[in-house]
Amino acid sequence: MVGPSIDVIQHNARIHVSSSYILPADDEERTRLNAQHGLMKAAFENRLILAPVILKPGDRVLDSGTGTASWLLDLAKEVPDTVSIYGVDISSLLFPSSPPSNVQFLAGSITQLPKTWTSTFTLINQKLLHAGLSAAAWQVAFSEMYRVLEPGGWINLSELNSDLDHVDFECGPAVKKMMTLVREIFRSVDALADAVYHLAGWLKQAGFTNIRTEMRRMPMNGNGGRPIRENICRVYMAMKTPAMKAGGFGFVRSETEYEDLVQAYGEEVAVTDNAAVLSYMISAQKPIVVAV
């Protein structure tokens, strides 16, 4: 039985490298991602790593889903150049053109890392992949991370809440409508807007221990919240193509209507008391003695 057809809304589409990832891979997204990295780093007192790891010569670090490699390039400035740093992403479009000599990039899936990497990494970082992973994919990715970490190695995760039910401020109508639409965009690719609240359980299930979570509120209101607010609005603008291809999910009927909703969201949070994005960093360790 064939379901009802979807009327795709005509729009100015951006470059998407995968039908299962709701954000594009173009120069505009590169700029946004790099700015977002700086904002999230500042929210955590300019720390790149929550995990209590001190990298030494000969160690190997993996940045999973590296994107523009903003985290990786920052780390390269802080560690000896005898630390080998790898970045893996489903697409090479956003990889930097002239990385440091101790940095290597690989186009590939984080759910299927090279077999030769087993038990070779001291640290694995992963930032903001909740827009591209299903619950099942998260669990496979964690199993792969566990495999490629050396005993005693650490994982470091950074994620945001994108789910309306976990927002901790009083939402107006534009915020409610926008975030409900965002939830549908996530669901259209089987991703979870609230993935961050499942991560600790999935890490434990994969065998990780010493799981620790820290949260920071990143204000969006007033003049001080402008950088975060504008970046979130750019995220929502970047999600336009999957929404348009799905016919607007019953929330919007045109590209202009979608863009107007994003603008209304931004204007509303700018004057909303306590409006903020919840940002999380999670660390976990592969046991030194691995059960067999």
Image (cartoon, grey):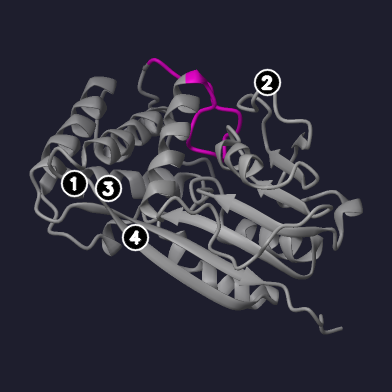
Q: Farthest right residue?
A: 116
Q: Position of residue 117 (x, y in %)?
A: 86, 54
User: Is residue 20 inside the magenta stretch?
Assistant: yes
| Lower sequence index among marks 4 and 2 | 2
Marks 2 and 1: which is nearer the front? Answer: 2
Circles 1 and 4, Cβ within 8 Å, touching? The answer is: no
Q: Position of residue 121 (x, y in %)?
A: 79, 57
- Whole-number angstrom distance, CA of label 1 to CA of label 3: 6 Å
Residue under numbered circle 3: 179
Work out which quarter of the rendered image holds the N terminus and state it. top right
Residues at marks 3 and 4, CA–CA distance in whole angstroms: 20 Å
Looking at the picture, which amino acid does disc 3 mark? Met
Instruction: Report how far apart the C-alphas of labels 2 and 1 lie in the structure.
Output: 38 Å
Magenta residue check for 37: no
Seen from the viewer's position, the closer of residues 188 and 4 is 188
Determine which residue is flagged by label 2.
97
Q: Label 1 amino acid?
A: Val
Secondary-structure class at tag 3 = helix
Q: Are marks 1 and 3 in contact (CB under 8 Å)?
A: yes
Work out whether 73 lies above or below 16. Answer: below
Q: Of the residues shown, which amino acid type is indicated by label 2?
A: Ser
User: Which of label 2 and label 3 is nearer to you?
Assistant: 2
Along the polypeptide, which appears first: circle 3 or circle 4? 3
Badge number at residue 175 = 1
Query: Measured along the vertical axis of the image, is residue 44 above or below residue 285?
Result: above
- Percent across and percent down for residue 257 are 21, 26
Q: First in sequence: mark 1 or mark 4?
A: 1
Closer to us: 153 or 59: 59
